[in-house]
Amino acid sequence: MTYSNPESLERIAREHLAELESRTEPLKPKERLRIPPQVMPEQPPEERRHNIREVALGYGPAQARLEALRCLQCKNAPCVEGCPVRIDIPSFIRAIAENRPEEAIAIIKRNSILPAICGRVCPQETQCQAPCTVGKSLKNIAAAVSIGRLERYAADWEREMGRAKPPEVKPETGRKVAVIGSGPASITVAADVRREGHAVTMFEAFHKPGGVLLYGIPEFRLPKRIVEEEIETLRKMGVEIRTNFVVGRTRTLNDLLEKDGYDAVFIGAGAGLPKFMNIEGENLVGVFSANEYLTRANLMRAYDRERARTPIYPSRKVAVLGGGNVAMDAARMALRIGAAEVHLIYRRTEAEMPARVEEVAHAKEEGVQFHLLQNAKRILGDEYGRVRGIELLRYELGEPDDSGRRRPVVIPESELVMEVDTVIVAIGNEPNPLIRQTTPGLQIARGGTLVVDEDGRTSIPRVFAGGDIVLGAATVILAMGEGRRAAAAINAMLAEK
Amino acid sequence: MHRIVEKKVLSDEVFLYRIEAPLIAESRKPGQFVIVQTDTEYGERIPLTIADADPVAGTITLIFQVVGDATHRLAALPEGGVIENVLGPLGRPTHIEHVGMVVCVGGGIGVAPLHPIAQAMKRAGNRLIVILGARTEKLIILESEMRALSDEFILCTDDGSRGRKALVTEPLREVCARTPKPDQVVAIGPPIMMKAVSETTRPFAIPTIVSLNSIMVDGTGMCGGCRVTVGGQTRFVCVDGPEFDGHEVDFTNLMQRLRTYKPFEDQAHERCHLELQIQELKKHA
Ligand SMILES: Cc1cc2nc3c(=O)[nH]c(=O)nc-3n(C[C@H](O)[C@H](O)[C@H](O)COP(=O)(O)OP(=O)(O)OC[C@H]3O[C@@H](n4cnc5c(N)ncnc54)[C@H](O)[C@@H]3O)c2cc1C
Ligand SMILES: Cc1cc2nc3c(=O)[nH]c(=O)nc-3n(C[C@H](O)[C@H](O)[C@H](O)COP(=O)(O)OP(=O)(O)OC[C@H]3O[C@@H](n4cnc5c(N)ncnc54)[C@H](O)[C@@H]3O)c2cc1C
Ligand code: SF4
Ligand code: SF4
Ligand code: FES
């Protein structure tokens, strides 16, 4: 894709919009379909790969309204079905088209409490935008209405105008709820439960709240300021946030219920345990989990080498193993930390990559080199135990597996060696076992996730769970949706007693 | 926020801090550690063993050696000052049992984490032999505390400035050769010392526990930065340890991994010296 400058994108949109507005007839569907999909203004690739600032700059008002005019306002609104939290998409888009952003954000907030975040990080192409009639009519999913970007636009508008107000809190009920973790699932529960007037304490192991939104997803995709504002909203609502508190160690879950008098507990501890490949050389110096690399970079701000005191490995040639969002983030972060070359190694093809399409495109534009149908066999070290290279095997696609994706099959004797000094393993995360190990009676599924019913109840009375600790590594919006459901059940339970 | 209620200088480079941390004081067990960060925005997170705790006063005791940037900044805090973040207690507690005769071997700053374990071993009814080693007299810590606990006490320094002029492995070998031989050895100190201790006890087939000081970030099992190879398997020191069977640990790999950030650390330490000097000058100006 060729790069377009943000000012010119908005200027062209303004002219186009003026032309459409000068007409008296309402737009016909055909005409709507002819409006070009609005390109997201971005920092130029050669610039952004050296800075940590957000890549996507957001639509200006004309671009947003023009994009909103592309929506056909379908009666059956298939897009809504694609959204895990069922935002009333046509209505909020119409409000943007008609230049009423305050109404748009109010509609979105009926279903989602984190629109500035979801608008940025939702995998829209597999969710709300996948079934969009516009994309279908144009036979191109990429040409669907950019629902996520419009959602972001409305949320950013509200924040930048200083209109965001903490939700109202009902009078104190005297009941109290503990929320473990501070990722999107827990943020949602804290807000929804607090709104009903119950006291809420949020417990976070790290020194700052936000979960993966803070330590995992990089600044260049999700500015930390936005996450901090969401946390600040919780504080304003009266949620108590206790950092440096590991449930299972500082205190057990049973202590919270029995000694500390919490009426209910929500577990939103996420899936933070990094998987390794269990191959030779994995403990060499210069091999990192993506979690470690990104935590050093994001949470500990190692990218700010002037001020941060947490070290990050000085890499020249980096191999990243994996094809999800985590792998893309690690690869793009490595460029920003100063690596000269970053190679992404994935054992299937681009079509099977679980990463958001936009992140894959961004990674390529920034110069990440993709090596598909290859996988690591072992990591090679030098006499000091430092990485000097990685031995790879080539693969081809065979029969589809359980997930419907074609299974990669190794090609015998296809070994090749790539010289690198750093290997970042980004092949997935699992739930951390700490809470289940320290909470007798908690029912566990295969893979270590917690078993819950449709309202998020675990096998222990008064204990609920949701987000990645239930779903395995999933998405922000699913975590939020689960939080919503669990909060409703908690509120119902507390209202009964 | 955790107030430093007491600050003591134990030796040139070693400090004892008693800090407010009531919940940790209540739940900690011997062998566990905390992660400390002096500054929330840019500070490094470092692991330190809980050397002692007073649940009534709500305090824990940390003993640390100044080796680099983070420990230097920690040492610069005054009594009454605050440490912004303290997380814990982390790690598996030491398995304490009545086994008979236990030898506790401590090297340098390793004596600090060894102390609560020795205490618990003694309380469990074991006969306790303590062997302490340090490079030189000035670096010996907790001598009287350890001496008071032990049934037999052996002190050595590398340079002979106090006690026997020997490495800890020398008296250890003699003790192992006695009949009856010790039932258990616990060794904490620099990796090279723990490696030597493990090699010393191996021919005698005496179970040997070591406490590993790998590099850490979160201390809760989510980064994998602390991983070590034990018995050919990858283990996380923060959640599977910090104690492991010394005969199974790949010390070479541990020592290599500890040097991961060496150039950066040296630079940071330099910078830290300068910054702290400037602060001092400003105070006096
Ligand atoms: C690098 C990366 C990129 C991603 N990109 C995307 C994306 O683009 N789009 C998308 O939708 N999703 C993305 N995801 C996934 C998404 O971030 C997660 O699905 C989501 O954050 C899960 O939310 P959660 O509330 O379940 O838990 P988390 O966000 O994982 O938060 C859990 C929190 O609980 C804390 N905790 C854990 N155990 C304890 C304990 N015992 N006591 C106290 N606190 C504890 C943890 O420290 C953590 O802060 C990404 C994930 C990663 C790692
Ligand atoms: C479980 C555990 C318990 C420990 N208990 C004590 C204790 O009671 N007293 C004590 O003095 N020391 C203890 N240590 C070691 C202590 O954490 C390091 O000395 C400290 O992190 C050094 O930080 P620095 O910035 O001052 O030095 P740096 O200049 O950063 O490094 C100096 C040395 O410390 C190691 N180191 C650096 N960063 C870390 C890190 N984040 N985690 C672990 N090691 C690191 C480096 O490999 C290097 O060898 C313990 C370590 C572990 C893992
Ligand atoms: S929350 Fe996500 S899936 Fe739902 S409309 Fe917004 S971007 Fe689409
Ligand atoms: S499916 Fe597409 S065109 Fe139809 S209402 Fe939804 S966003 Fe608009
Ligand atoms: S310190 Fe991160 S996993 Fe052990």
Image: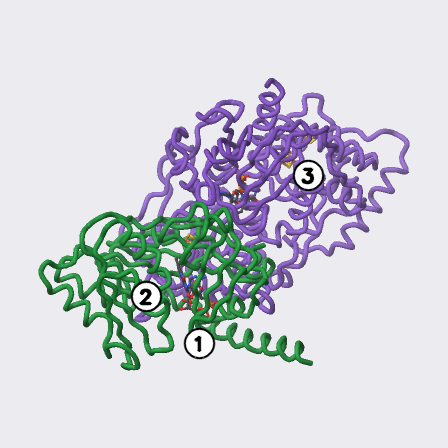
Residue A164: x, y in percent? 76, 41
- Give the secondary structure at mark 1: loop
Q: Amino acid at mark 3?
A: Gly
Going from N to C along the chain, the mark reached first, 2 or 1, is: 1
Q: Nearer the viewer, mark 1 or mark 3?
A: 1
Q: Residues within 10 Å of mark 2 (few under 14, many from 20)?
A: many
Q: Which mark is residue A238?
A: 3
> What chain is tagged by disc 2?
B
> Image check: B118 left or right of A474?
left
- Give the secondary structure at mark 2: loop
Question: Color used for chain A?
Answer: purple
Task: State ligand 3's quadrant.
Answer: top right
Which residue is nearer to you in this view: A328 or B177? B177
Q: Amino acid at mark 2?
A: Gly
Q: Which mark is residue B189?
A: 2
Task: Give the chain coloured green.
Answer: B
